Amino acid sequence: MRVLKKNLRGDEGEITLLPESLDDLWHLQHLLERGDLVFAQTHRKVATIADKARPEKMERRAVRLGIRVEDIEFHIYSNWLRLHGQIKSGIDVSSYHTLNIEVGTDLSIVKYHWRPDQLQRINEAVAESQRPKVVLALVEEGEATIGVLRQFGVQMAAELRTGSGKGGGEDLRAVFFRDVAEAVNQAAGEGAQVILAGPGFAKENLKRLIDSSYPELAERIIMDDASSIGRSGFQEVLRRGAVKSALESSRIALEARLIEDLFCEIATNGRAAYGLKEVETAVNYGAVEHLLVLDELVRSRKVDEIMRAAASARGKVVIFSSEFEPGERLRSLGGLAALLRFKIARNP
């Protein structure tokens, strides 16, 4: 994410952003709210008159419009964000239009109230864009899963299994490892760091093949252990400390650590609160160190009030992605929880 312009007075004003990745579009989905005024380049049919002898006809032209947002739609696998609302600036004022925001489309967002966590999210998105991509490759005998670490979770890049074609077992096994090595190389591209993990010795066998076939890629590999592959294996790797150098600053790793800490505190009846009533009480006491909020709840007026109150009392607000396991675990607690500076009495 790049910040092209920022013009704020207090918590009101305009910020112009340039999304540079799928992660940035995901961030924008949660930065934007109903009622925001958004300006962006778009295409709209415009009436033209070719000459006096011809009737009026419609042409699609590039125009810059400002709309008052009413609906927000984001699709991870389509790489676009759609904003629908009434035109407030430009041609056809009062009509309705949909802005299609893609990677490389700059947009200006005008809000009456920028929440602290929204400004924090922009700063995190800018910082994340400067960090190298991280690929997680999990392998066991006959099966492998490869994912790209995103700020909203791990996006599956490939799933491979030993083929069922003719030939001896060793031949099929060799083909499988060659296919996995090539898939890891393609997912990593240039410069990405790769975490290679899994149960047993399959990962060491794959590493030896990569050492000989892809020496440049081999230099970017960190080895680790995992008891399984797939989503549970990704989550296990994110929780482990052995890959801290690669993951410590990633948003999803932060979510994984915080949710583990939260459940540990709950299990020992310690410094934790969850659910609307308990969290609101903790905020009123000034006890909240980290406020954990599921992204699906951030547009709730009540939750918005709680986030503002927690931030004003020097609590850090962390918005959890609903796309991955930490967010799913937070949802099981009602989508709202807090790690506390000190223990408070639980609501009966």
Image: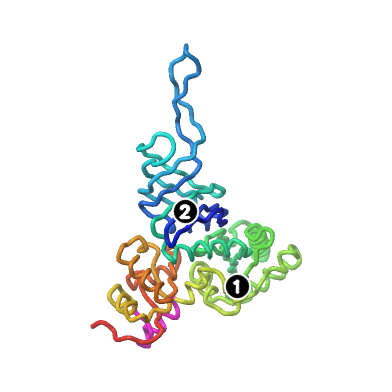
Which residue is at a point 40% across and 76% down the rendered structure image? 313
Q: Where on the picture, by quarter, is residue 166?
A: bottom right
Using the rendered image of the protein, determine whether residue 146 is visible from the camera's viewpoint: no
Horizontal and vertical percent position of residue 121: 49, 64
Amino acid under disc 2: Glu
Looking at the rendered image, the quarter that the C terminus falls into is: bottom left
Q: How is the image coloured?
A: rainbow
Q: Is 249 inside the magenta-drawn segment? A: no
Which residue is at a point 44% across and 37% down the rendered structure image? 90
Amino acid under disc 1: Ala
- CA separation, marks 1 and 2? 45 Å
The majority secondary structure of the magenta stretch comes to helix
Q: Pointer 1: what residue?
A: 197
Q: Nearer the viewer, mark 1 or mark 2?
A: 2
Question: Judging from the image, what secondary structure is the residue with disc 2 in?
Answer: strand
Kindly identify which numbered label has been placed on residue 14: 2
